Image (spheres, grey):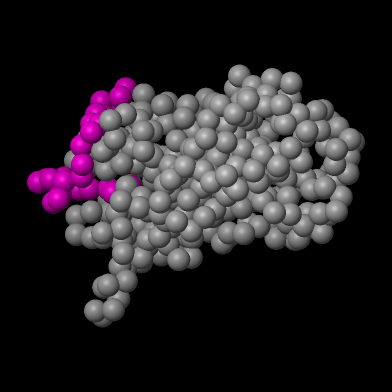
Amino acid sequence: MRVTVIGAGVAGLTCALELAERGVAVEVLERSAQLGASACSWFAGGMLAPWCELESSDPLIARLGAQSIPWWRERFAGTLINGTLVVANGRDAADLTQFAARTGHFEPLASAEIAALEPDLAGRFSQGLYFRDEGHLDPRAALTALAARLGELGVAIRYGLEAPARSPAGRQVVDCTGLAARGQLTDLRGVKGEMLLLRLRELSLSRPVRLLHPRVPVYVVPRPDGLFMVGATMIESDQGTRISARSMLELLSAAYALHPAFGEAEIVEIGTGVRAAFADNLPRLRRHGETLYVNGLYRHGFLIAPALARRAADVVLHGRHFPEVMDADPRQRRLA
């Protein structure tokens, strides 16, 4: 079997690798000139936090995420399983209680236990939640590693190529182009996310920290070389414009509330990306002729992409059906 995967974001690369590891002849087409040039995956947080996501997501996301963590650990050496720490200032203790009620697989922490986990946060928070089995990775390093592994398996990634209007003869197609697939997946919408990359060598964190800030709940994810990714915004928009002044102020103020040292941080990069989502914010595998669309990953790309890739490979190779993520196109339902 020969398969063309369209799109070299995290969904496309995981699908391509899953198929290639099963002996399929795969090629990847990417419209950008280089890896990460237009993919929202490049600006992702890289948090592997299925149980934290229960706070605002369907339990399906937690199931897919829990299945994806071992996949990452097996294929990307940079996957870190150091857990997630969730904290709130004293006046926001009710938010922490509500977060705990909606999630699971955590341990409540007192001030001394928070300090033991993250010494640089000592004395700043009186209580928190520790999701021990969660992890994180650097999305850019992970995408680069997946592309390199595909190269080792003989899979070509062809940059600067648009998706063909028709399926290539003798090939099945797996389309992982996100919002660009809206011509076929008419019920997709765009959700813009904004991020800051800060450098602060005076502060050290070993794991992602989520601060339940009253205006913008923020997450701070440590990266190598004193870098921290700060993000959280979700704006209903398919315009991938630069970050707004209000969003930047809110992200910086929330990071400062986590630790005042962020007030002296260097702003290394500002980025935005538009995630593709369906109305319920759940992913879909959807067929149109010879094309299988893998889409609607919303803000959960790195968290759930491997589990979706395994299902997509089973659909392509064995014709399996996964009712939790597969449905008919809305136009087909209306015609029926």
The stretch in magenta equals 151-176
Q: Is residue 173 magenta?
A: yes
The N terminus sits in image quarter: top left
Is residue 22 something one can see in this rendering? no
Residue 264, horizontal then vertical, whole percent: 71, 26
Question: Of residues 171 and 129, which is closer to you in this image?
Answer: 129
Is residue 284 something one can see in this rendering? yes
Residue 150, horizontal then vertical, whole percent: 33, 28
The residue that appears at 61% across and 38% down in the rendered structure is: 230
Question: Of residues 34 and 78, which is closer to you in this image?
Answer: 34
Quarter location, residue 101 = bottom right
Q: Is residue 115 magenta?
A: no
Quarter location, residue 86 = top right
The C terminus sits in image quarter: bottom left
Residue 187, horizontal then vertical, whole percent: 36, 65
Residue 240, horizontal then vertical, whole percent: 42, 47
Tell whether 68 sits left or right of 115.
left
Quarter location, residue 84 = top right
Give the number of callouts.
Answer: 0
Question: Of residues 277 and 250, which is closer to you in this image?
Answer: 250
The residue that appears at 24% across and 79% down in the rendered structure is: 335
Q: Residue furthest left?
A: 169
The residue that appears at 77% across and 34% down in the rendered structure is: 259
Would you place residue 183 above or below residue 265 in this image?
Answer: below
Tell whether 10 sits left or right of 106.
left
The residue that appears at 22% across and 48% down in the rendered structure is: 173
